[in-house]
């Protein structure tokens, strides 16, 4: 099935000033519409964590492939009384003709690294900024949150249950996609399950139980309807006095009739989940159903799941909704899109944005990203942002250093590390050269990626920071540009 949310044309999914800047470049002629390089990156890990998960690239690909201005789009822009006819005529045949490089979906990523690099004529690179950030920011945020929730759950399955609490159908559907990439085993969102070939999961609501005279009848009917998966919601009235006993009665009837489901258990959706799960497990175990699934929902997040685990809760399946699909404690990813180079005379000239806040000073030039692994353990050691064309030999010693606290240096002996280039070509000359994997395969890749992290980086409190260093040539370029800006401004002030 088509992986797009629907058949909408997203070309106008952009900020108005992108279009006014486009017209400005158009009016000034070819000299101002040369190729440029923009980097999409973020500055702080979500939830004060030690990493993030890159996600949303597949939707960026769909968007770029379909990028065109319809007659309705052009007429709408004409009605704004801002855009001139020659520019509107140019838009009629507009297509993206540039190059895009990106870190594959499901990869662990860190602040300041280029997640997406756009190399294109200025008008094209400017137009796509907003949509790229929209897709990457939202899905990377939810995938990161999901990875944290699933880490807290350990080997237990986590189901994404957030559609009804999401900020609209797009966020609910693409958010569920991202949650599965981050580690969830499936989703309650049926349209997402259909679109992306993801397991559709769920049990029943309290209203099902309330529509019968008693819980036993409700559970018996449900088990008859779904003989391979009878997970019964036991907290409609009184969890321990009626809900769990009713579930046990139905399980006994199924066992006596030789019709035990392959998968069965109970779900707790309210109350003290640690206490109730332990009491419910004791009752189930004494009745001979110690292998029953005990699923919990009810406003869960990674912190509550971690706390319940520490309390010895007998829960082995989790349904997580609101706090996951909205990333309630960290509602925005914060990704930005900054100019890093302009082509002049056939050569890319580096550009830098200055700020009194050091973290907001951009990294200039045409860059790529190298990931360095410890050869013995396979664990991620550091990332190195470098200029395109730099070469590294794993057999030789490698000196890396902190780009802010430059006295912090580490010498990696040759033969003790491996290097992987993270940015891969996605579009070349406007043509897509990258094929996205199915969501469940990306999920497996994401799991492998997280296993390259040290446990200290994955902890929730004060995680270890993964080093993101600059290569010596990139550091020297950045320093030279900063010195030039300082000298120029000093001369002007005099």
Image: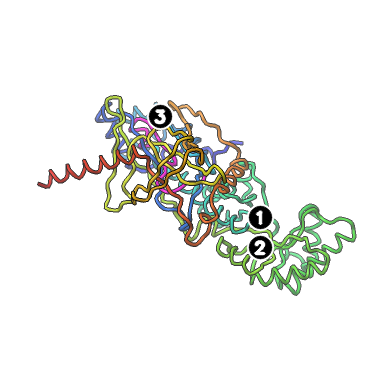
Q: Quadrant of the N terminus?
A: top right
Residue at which label 3 appears: 98
Q: Nearer the viewer, mark 3 or mark 1?
A: 1
Left or right for 178, reference 99: right
Mark found first going from the N terminus, 2 or 1: 1
Residue at which label 1 appears: 155
Which quadrant of the figure has residue 316? bottom right
Mark found first going from the N terminus, 3 or 2: 3
Residue at which label 2 appears: 296
Mark found first going from the N terminus, 3 or 1: 3
Residue drawn at (39%, 30%) of the image: 389
Magenta includes 125? yes
Q: CA distance from mark 3 to mark 1?
A: 43 Å
| Position above or below: 161 against 24 | below
Residue 271: image location, x then y, percent: 64, 71
| Position above or below: 87 against 165 | above
* Front one among 74 and 295: 295
Q: Nearer the viewer, mark 2 or mark 1?
A: 1
* Front one among 392 and 58: 392
Q: CA distance from mark 3 to mark 2?
A: 48 Å
Residue 254: image location, x then y, percent: 85, 59
Label 2 crowd bin: few (<14), some (14–19), many (20+), radius 10 Å: many
Give the extent of the magenta segment.
107-127
Q: Look at the numbered disc 1 and give the secondary structure of its residue.
A: loop
């Amino acid at each position: 099935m088509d992986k797009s949310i629907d058949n909408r044309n997203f070309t106008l999914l952009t900020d108005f000033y992108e279009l006014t800047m486009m017209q400005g470049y158009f009016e000034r002629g070819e000299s101002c519409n040369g190729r440029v390089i923009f980097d999409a990156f973020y500055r702080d890990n979500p939830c004060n964590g030690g990493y993030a998960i890159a996600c949303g690239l597949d939707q960026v690909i769909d968007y770029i492939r379909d990028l065109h201005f319809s007659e309705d789009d052009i007429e709408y822009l004409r009605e704004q009384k801002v855009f001139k006819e020659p520019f509107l005529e140019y838009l009629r045949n507009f297509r993206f003709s540039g190059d895009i490089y990106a870190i594959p979906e499901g990869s662990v990523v860190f602040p300041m690294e280029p997640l997406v690099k756009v190399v294109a004529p200025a008008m094209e690179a400017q137009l796509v900024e907003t949509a790229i950030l929209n897709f990457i920011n939202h899905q990377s945020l939810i995938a990161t949150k999901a990875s944290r929730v699933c880490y807290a759950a350990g080997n237990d399955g986590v189901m994404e249950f957030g559609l009804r609490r999401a900020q609209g159908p797009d966020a609910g559907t693409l958010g569920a996609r991202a949650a599965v990439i981050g580690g969830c085993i499936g989703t309650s969102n049926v349209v997402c399950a259909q679109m992306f070939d993801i397991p559709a999961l769920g049990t029943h609501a309290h209203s099902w139980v309330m529509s019968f005279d008693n819980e036993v009848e409700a559970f018996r009917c449900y088990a008859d309807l779904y003989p391979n998966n009878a997970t019964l919601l036991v907290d409609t009235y009184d969890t321990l006095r009626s809900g769990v006993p009713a579930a046990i009665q139905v399980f006994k009837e199924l066992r006596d009739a030789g019709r035990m489901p392959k998968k069965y258990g109970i779900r707790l959706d309210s109350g003290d989940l640690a206490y109730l799960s332990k009491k419910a497990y004791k009752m189930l175990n004494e009745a001979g159903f110690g292998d029953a699934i005990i699923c919990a929902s009810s406003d869960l997040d990674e912190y509550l799941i971690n706390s319940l685990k520490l309390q010895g809760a007998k829960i082995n399946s989790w349904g997580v909704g609101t706090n996951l699909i909205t990333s309630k404690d960290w509602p925005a990813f914060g990704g930005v899109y900054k100019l890093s180079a302009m082509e002049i005379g056939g050569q890319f000239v580096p550009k830098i944005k200055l700020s009194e806040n050091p973290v907001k000073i951009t990294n200039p030039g045409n860059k790529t990203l190298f990931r360095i692994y410890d050869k013995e353990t396979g664990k991620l050691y550091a990332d190195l942002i470098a200029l395109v064309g730099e070469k590294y030999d794993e057999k030789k010693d490698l000196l890396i250093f902190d780009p802010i606290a430059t006295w912090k240096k580490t010498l990696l002996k040759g033969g003790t590390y491996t290097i992987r280039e993270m940015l891969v070509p996605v579009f070349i000359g406007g043509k897509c050269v990258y094929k996205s994997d199915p969501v469940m395969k990306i999920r497996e890749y994401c799991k492998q990626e997280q296993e390259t992290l040290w446990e200290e980086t994955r902890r929730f409190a004060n995680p270890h920071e993964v080093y993101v260093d600059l290569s010596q040539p990139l550091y020297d370029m950045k320093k030279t540009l900063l010195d030039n800006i300082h000298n120029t401004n000093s001369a002007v002030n005099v």
